Amino acid sequence: EDQVTQSPEALRLQEGESSSLNCSYTVSGLRGLFWYRQDPGKGPEFLFTLYSAGEEKEKERLKATLTKKESFLHITAPKPEDSATYLCAVQAGVGANSKLTFGKGITLSVRP
Amino acid sequence: DTGVSQDPRHKITKRGQNVTFRCDPISEHNRLYWYRQTLGQGPEFLTYFQNEAQLEKSRLLSDRFSAERPKGSFSTLEIQRTEQGDSAMYLCASSARMARAFFGQGTRLTVV
């Protein structure tokens, strides 16, 4: 069974204090690893897809990296508006179903 | 791209009542997913449609839950004889083939 574990559960940063969020996964045949951002009471908003070990993607203050066992979401000089829950999900296996298996998420709070 | 639309946004119902939620996916997307999210957890897969065919259902989906996607367009999720444990956010997502999934804003169900 596919498993996704995110750590830490919660992270509090001062504005400008860079850090990383971790996503460890165990899957049979990874097809893609996804990062989403979710604001309270809203649906997840897509950030990145990574497909193979060594791949990196960047968007503004966020950078996602992937190894064979885990992914990191690096946040450089965060701002209060980066406060949200960050979800990691994997898409795995064979067949037509491209369902996602999510971790529990990491709640990030950035203080001004 | 008008996004994935879900209706209603909030639903409060008494235990034992039936409820139905609607999801309108992005028009050109042939894949549609339902997920359920409880507080402090990531979204959990419920069911998947490719066009009008329901191709997979999670073991989480009890006999009280049924989903349809007539004509491969909008989808409905019905819960019969609701229980307090059904209280959650119900998320709909759509995608084109193996591309990233776009989520709606969700329907928050409270069973009292």
Image: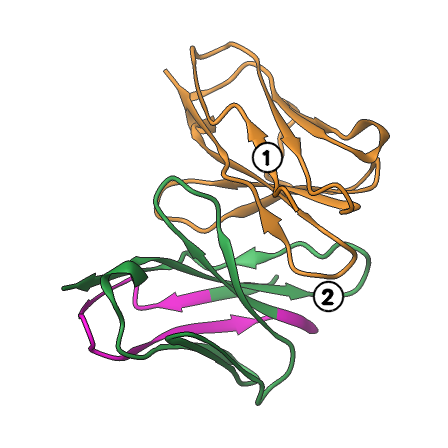
Q: Residue at x 58, y 85 (%)?
A: A55
Give above or below for B80 relative to A13.
above
Judging by colour alone, the chain drawn in green in this rendered image is A
Give residue B92's position: percent from left, percent from top.
60, 39
The label number, if any, that marks residue B5 in the structure image: 1
Which chain's residue wears label 1?
B
- Chain assignment, label 2: A
User: Secondary structure under badge 2?
Assistant: loop
Q: Amino acid at mark 2?
A: Gly
Mark 1 is on which residue type?
Answer: Ser
* Span highlighted in magenta in the image: A5-32
- Report how far apart the C-alphas of labels 2 and 1 lie in the structure: 29 Å
Mark 1 crowdedness (10 Å alpha carbons): few <14, some 14-19, many ≥20 = some
Q: Is residue B70 left or right of residue B34?
A: right
Q: Is residue A51 left or right of residue B12?
A: right
Q: Farthest residue to the bottom: give it.
A: A54
Q: Residue at x 62, y 34 (%)?
A: B61
Rendering quarter of residue B100: bottom right
Reply yes or no: does residue A16 show up in magenta.
Answer: yes
Task: Classify mark 1: helix, strand or loop.
Answer: strand
| In this rendering, the label closer to the viewer, 2 or 1 | 1
Residue A93 is labelled as 2
Residue A33 at x, y percent in the picture: 58, 70
Crowd tier of the residue under label 2, counting other residues whose Cα lies within 10 Å: few below 14, some 14–19, many 20 or above: some
- Choose between A100 and B73: the one closer to the eye: B73
User: For the view shown, which residue lies furthest in the front direction?
Assistant: B1
